[in-house]
Amino acid sequence: MDDLDDVFVAQVMSESLYTVTPDTLVEEAATGMMEHGIGSVIVVDDDGTLRGILTNTDFVQIVAERRPKDQTPVSEYMSTDLVTADPGDSLASVATTMLDRGFHHMPVTDGDSGVVGVVSTTDLTAYLSSLRA
């Protein structure tokens, strides 16, 4: 089995991102997540700067509060106190951070390029499963 300190986030992260802006309605974000089969959307402003993340877990709160999905922007529910990974971070350190913080998704940023991907618990599981094959 590979040492996870020698495996980098760039090797397992999802690079195809579904992004929305803070004023996107939650109904549109949910539809996009379902169409793309993903568990989170990255929230960026008009110049592509990372502003937040909205995950399938956030939709539990949206439904529980019975807010009108067609009138509520994602900015009301997105997480903005973000911890991000760098493509060169070791998978071991990112997995530890995700476990310690209870995250299922972590945006991956690369300096001037901004958001370049997202790593999820699904990505980690898929990688570990591939090692056993």
Image (cartoon, grey):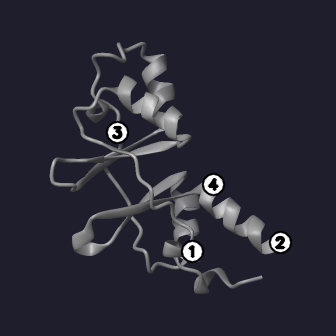
Q: Quadrant of residue 66?
A: top left
SS at mark 2 in the image = helix
The quadrant of the rendering that contains the N terminus is bottom right
SS at mark 1 in the image = helix
Tag 2 residue: 132
The relative height of residue 55 versus residue 63 in the rendered view (above or below) is below
C-alpha separation, residue under disc 4 versus residue under disc 1: 13 Å
Is disc 2 in contact with disc 3, using a CB cutoff of under 8 Å? no
C-alpha separation, residue under disc 1 versus residue under disc 3: 25 Å
The residue lying toward the viewer, choosing from 9 and 62, is 9
Q: Residues within 10 Å of mark 1 (few under 14, many from 20)?
A: many
Q: Which label belongs to residue 122?
A: 4
* Mark 2 or mark 1: whose residue is earlier in sequence: 1
Residue 44 on image: x %, y %: 25, 49
Is disc 4 in contact with disc 1, using a CB cutoff of under 8 Å? no
Which label sits in the foreground, 2 or 3?
A: 2
* Mark 1 or mark 3: whose residue is earlier in sequence: 3
C-alpha separation, residue under disc 2 versus residue under disc 3: 36 Å
Is disc 4 in contact with disc 2, using a CB cutoff of under 8 Å? no
C-alpha separation, residue under disc 3 versus residue under disc 4: 20 Å
Residue 91 on image: x %, y %: 57, 74
The relative height of residue 11 versus residue 41 in the rendered view (above or below) is below
Is disc 3 in contact with disc 4, using a CB cutoff of under 8 Å? no
Q: Residues within 10 Å of mark 4 (few under 14, many from 20)?
A: some
* Mark 2 or mark 3: whose residue is earlier in sequence: 3
Is disc 1 in contact with disc 3, using a CB cutoff of under 8 Å? no
Which label sits in the foreground, 2 or 1?
A: 2
Tag 3 residue: 78
